[in-house]
Amino acid sequence: MNWLLILDLFGVFVFALSGGFDGAKYRLDILGITVLAIAAGVGGGMMRDMLLGIHPPAAFVDQRYLFACLAGALLAILFSHRVERHFIWVKLADAIGLGVFAAIGAAKAVEYQLGWVGVLMISALTATGGGVIRDLLVREIPMILRTDFYASAALIGGVIYLGTDKAGLDTETCLALSIGSAIIARLLAIRFDVSLPKARRR
């Protein structure tokens, strides 16, 4: 069983769901919601693949990635009328996608024998790239630049994967610990309003 592929598709679906709900929040039409879902779902993975020299990116080769995005978009469309009352679920979906993609990015980077800096960069980029595209499409400052411990949570996931891999743990355990640590870090940041220090204007 290819756990990396399964997790990748799951992460695509969850991020697509998050992107679709974001489109519903802005009251976009069905096409707009679908575009945001696809951008959020595969944006980070496509950046990762291009940087690692995987051409064409997996999202263009395997149509299951598109189907995962469309499933997330459809779910967001069906429940769009409830998104404002239950926006915490959008944040939860985003946190899960962040954790999954941080771990997947780290695993891919380790597979391609990158150094620790490269592993952490690919991990963070995979986890945040789709969200950056999504936010720019709706003219928001990307979440990675403005909000509570977002990229930092992805980096924590990357560090945990790198550390557990160096300790000799099997891939499945490394992935589970990395995903769990990134999700927990993100949710705790949301719950307790944790963020890195911000610049102050005089």
Image (cartoon, rainbow, N blue to C red):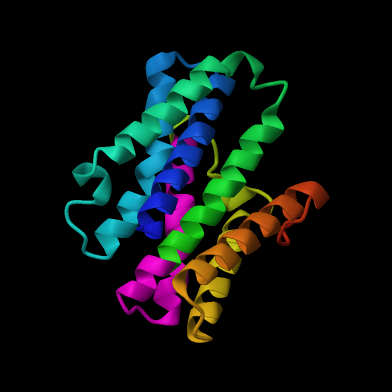
- Above or below: residue 36 compared with residue 10: above
The answer to whether residue 135 is magenta is yes
Q: Is residue 174 left or right of residue 201?
A: left
Please tell me how many numbered marks the rendered image carries: 0
Most distant residue in the front direction: 1
Q: Position of residue 22 (x, y in %)?
A: 54, 29
Name the spot of residue 154 as percent of width and height, x first.
56, 60
Residue at x-position 27% and y-position 65%:
52
The residue positioned 67% from the left and 54% from the top of the image is 186
Q: Is residue 139 visible?
A: no
Examine the rendered structure and indicate whether residue 116 appears above or below residue 134. Answer: below
- The residue closer to the viewer here, 129 or 17, is 17
Residue drawn at 36 percent across, 70 percent down: 109
Q: 38 above or below 83?
A: below
Instruction: Decide whether the magenta segment is chiefly helix, strand or loop.
Output: helix
Q: Which residues are magenta?
A: 107-136
Q: Position of residue 188 (x, y in %)?
A: 76, 54
- Relative vertical location of residue 155 with respect to residue 58 in this rendering, above or below: below
Between 22 and 15, the one lying in front of the other is: 15
Residue 115 within the segment the image draws in magenta: yes
Left or right, 98 with reference to 7 = right
Figure quadrant of the C terminus: bottom right
Task: Identify the image quadrant of the N terminus.
Answer: bottom left
Specify whether 63 is left or right of 162: left
